[in-house]
Image (spheres, rainbow, N blue to C red):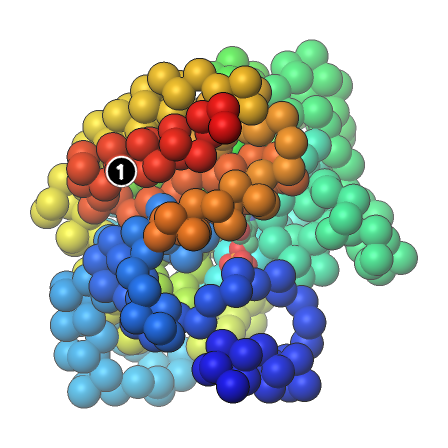
Amino acid sequence: MSNLKSLQEREKRLLLPTYVRQPMAVRRAKGMYVWDERGRKYLDFFGGVAVNALGHCHPAVVAAIRRQSQAYLHVSNHYYQEPQVALAERLVKVAGMSQAFLCNSGAEAIEGALKLAAKATGKREFIACHDGFHGRTLAALSLTHERKYRDPFSHVLMKSVKFTPYNDVKALRFALGTDTAALIVEPIQGEGGVRVAGEEFLRVAREACDEKGVLLVLDEIQTGLGRTGKWFAKDHTGIQPDILVSAKALGGGLPLGAFLSRDDLGGKFVPGDHGSTFGGNPVSCAAGLAVLQTIEKQRLVDRAAKMGTLLLEGLRGLRSDKVKEVRGQGLLLGMEMKDPAAPWVEKMRQQGILLNATSETVLRLTPPLIVSKPEVERVVQALGTELAPK
Ligand SMILES: Cc1ncc(COP(=O)(O)O)c(C=O)c1O
């Protein structure tokens, strides 16, 4: 029996069946590439769901992990730890925020952001957007719009959440009420099919929040840390949130999330209001600091903008009647197909290229920020070959 078949059988017995997996088992990964158990090499334009901003096993990240793991792995949040403070220092600076709470994942960061908003305002209600995705823990799921994720759990989701149409400025002005604690928005809806918020929508969101005393929470879990060609997608607009949520690329492949607060907002929390056994794990923080330093040192934000434009133009140039629209910003791009996108993911995998399908019909491209021109050209060419009339 092949290793893949045996893995599939053992997994079926042992792991809860929550994931639809591609039919490949990974043996190793390095830079832009992943190798399967048969030794076949794939060019990775998925990047572990937009996590591997520096590609796989970047030497700076591996060295930071090695260094920190030789010092200590875990001592608990009962003690002061340099890696947490060093990471927070750099992170709040690039985000233009003031303070951070460090945790382990995106959903966990969203949960904390909601608690901070609720405590700071004393209000009860949250407004999220149609087609938005914020995670799968109960509060994060309560803010997630997609019925397929919500419906099985609708009986336990928070009742104090309302949804407003994405990019609908008029509806947004009416959505915020006197009991609204926070409005939560993704600058680009990644899971929702790579839909970009208009600049006006974000500007009106900021204005309406200010008028009504509502906190603006930007979920930059997928869009942050250089992916869209700016440190954060908000930087395309100049709009500052009250709370900014980050995760995914932050840990360089290790679990790490954070929510960042503006000015004195963080001071609304007192000891005991929030916490996490593993939050701000020193090894993850050391990896995170290496990620931020490397993005800065290698000018990867600019590179994401440049390579993103090249990829966007290449994809738009394909002009296939199977494609409805190509959209996105930087290296977070979506190609909306007229039919389901999953078969295209498999066709590309057969060609040695990893992509992802989201929102049924959208082919999502989220390559590492280290991607090069020949790699962009290879993917555009391969898609062109697949999309060509046969
Ligand atoms: C915008 C956004 N928010 C939240 C999450 C949840 O993050 P995690 O899977 O780390 O809990 C995701 C994950 O895809 C996301 O894209």
- Disc 1 residue lies near ligand 1 with CB under 8 A: no
The correct choice, above or below, for 275 with respect to 92 in the image is below
Q: Mark 1 highlights which residue? A: 378
Q: Is residue 119 visible to the viewer in this orientation of the structure?
A: no
Q: Is residue 1 visible to the viewer in this orientation of the structure?
A: yes
x and y percent of residue 354 in the render? 40, 51
Farthest residue toward the front?
390
In-front residue for pair 258/291: 291
Question: Would residue 171 be found to the left or right of residue 88 on screen?
Answer: right
Farthest residue toward the left?
297
In-front residue for pair 313/160: 313
Residue drawn at (65%, 53%) of the image: 140
Residue at disc 1, secondary structure: helix
The amino acid pointed to by label 1 is: Arg
Farthest residue toward the right?
155
x and y percent of residue 331 in the render? 34, 36
x and y percent of residue 183 in the render? 63, 35
Residue drawn at (16%, 52%) of the image: 294
Q: Quadrant of residue 235?
A: top left
In-front residue for pair 187/311: 311
In-front residue for pair 13/260: 13
Residue drawn at (38%, 29%) of the image: 384
The correct choice, above or below, for 229 with respect to 50 in the image is above
